[in-house]
Image (cartoon, helix red, strand yellow):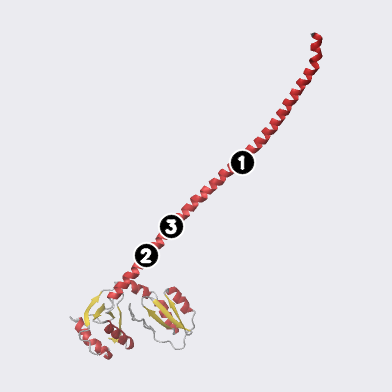
Amino acid sequence: MTDSSKKFEPGLAVKTRGMSDMEAIAEAVLEKQRGYLETRFDKLQQMGEDTEAKLGAIQADLFSLNESIGSVTVELDKIRYEATSETMQLKLADMEDRSRRCNVRAIGLPEGIEGSNAVQYLTKSLPKWFPTLGNLDGEIMRAHRVYSDNRKRSGPRTLIFNTLRYTTRQLILRAAKKSPLTMNGRPVRLSPDYSGYTVKRRQAFTQAMNMARAKGVEFFLLYPATLKVKAAGKTEAFQSAEEAEDFISSLPAQRVPPAAGNDDSVPGQPDEAAG
C-alpha cells in the first residue's frame, strides 16, 4: 500500500500545480477585467458628470431665455398698448375735427369789439373786411370767446364762430389768406378750428416751416399733419418733423422766397397748398 501510494504522488503534484496555474490565470484575467471595468466605470462616471454639467448649463440658458422672453413679451405688450392708444387718439381726434369742420378761429381780434352780439358783429364785419364774401346773412350760426391753455398769454381771447355751411367757412378762410386782416396795427388771423391733439401734431412742424420760409422753399401743411416740401421739381412728404427739418436744412436757399402759410383743409376735403 505504501509503495503504491508513493507511486502516485508525482501525479498528484502535477495536478496541484496545474490547478494553481489555472487559478493564477483566472486571477490575472479577473484582474484585467476588473481594471477594464474600472476604467469604463470611471469614463462613464466622467461622462455623467460632464452631462450633469451640460444639463446645468442648459438649464441656466433656458432660465435666461425665459427671462428674455418675458422681457420681450412685456415690451410687445407695451408697444401694442401704445399703438392701440395712438390709434384711438387718432380716431377721436378725427371725430372731433369733423365736428368742428364748419368752425373758424379768429385769433387776435380785440377783446370786446364784438359787443353783446358776436354773431351780428361778424355777419356785418366779415363782408367789410373781405368784400368778395358778399352777403353773409344767416351764415354765421354761433360765436363765443375761449380761454387759451397758455395762462401767461396777455392778448385777447380767441373768438370761435360756426358757419352754416362748410363752403362758407372755406370762402372766409381763403379770403383771409389772400387779404390778411389787421386791426389797430396788429394782425388778426383766421384759421381752422382743430382738436387739441391735431393742433399739437401740426405745431410740431413749426420749426420746419420756418426753415422753409427762410430758404424760400415752397411747402404744404396738409391735414391732419403731413408736411409736403417742393424742391428740385419733386415733392417730398413728411409725417416726422425731425425728418422734415433734416431734409430742408440740406436744401440750398431759393432766390425768391414764396409766401407760405398753413392750409385750411379738413377731413374729407381736398388738401390745399400752404405756400
Of residue 61 and residue 146, the one placed in the foreground of this image is 61
**Which quarter of the picture shows residue 217?**
bottom left
- Ranked by sequence position, the earlier of labels 1 and 3 is 1
**Which quarter of the picture shows residue 94?**
bottom left
- Residue 13, horizontal then vertical, whole percent: 78, 18
Asked whether the beta carbons under mark 1 and mark 2 sit within 8 Å of each other, the answer is no
Q: Secondary structure at mark 2?
A: helix
Q: Secondary structure at mark 3?
A: helix
The residue labelled by disc 1 is 46
Distance from disc 3 to disc 2, alpha carbons, whole Å, reads: 16 Å
Q: Is 170 situated above or below 64?
A: below
Distance from disc 1 to disc 3, alpha carbons, whole Å, reads: 40 Å
Asked if residue 63 lies left or right of residue 167, the reply is right
Q: Is 254 situated above or below 61?
A: below
Q: Amino acid at mark 2?
A: Thr
Q: Amino acid at mark 3?
A: Thr
Q: Name the residue located 33 percent from the left edge and 86 percent from the top edge.
A: 177
How crowded is the residue under tag 3: few (<14 C-alpha within 10 Å), some, or many (20+)? few
How crowded is the residue under tag 2: few (<14 C-alpha within 10 Å), some, or many (20+)? few
Asked if residue 243 lies left or right of residue 95, the reply is right
Q: Quadrant of the N terminus?
A: top right
Residue 73 marker? 3
- Residue 152, horizontal then vertical, whole percent: 30, 73
Q: Name the residue located 27 percent from the left edge and 75 percent from the top edge.
A: 99
The residue labelled by disc 2 is 84
Q: Quadrant of the C terminus?
A: bottom left
Asked whether the beta carbons under mark 3 and mark 2 sit within 8 Å of each other, the answer is no
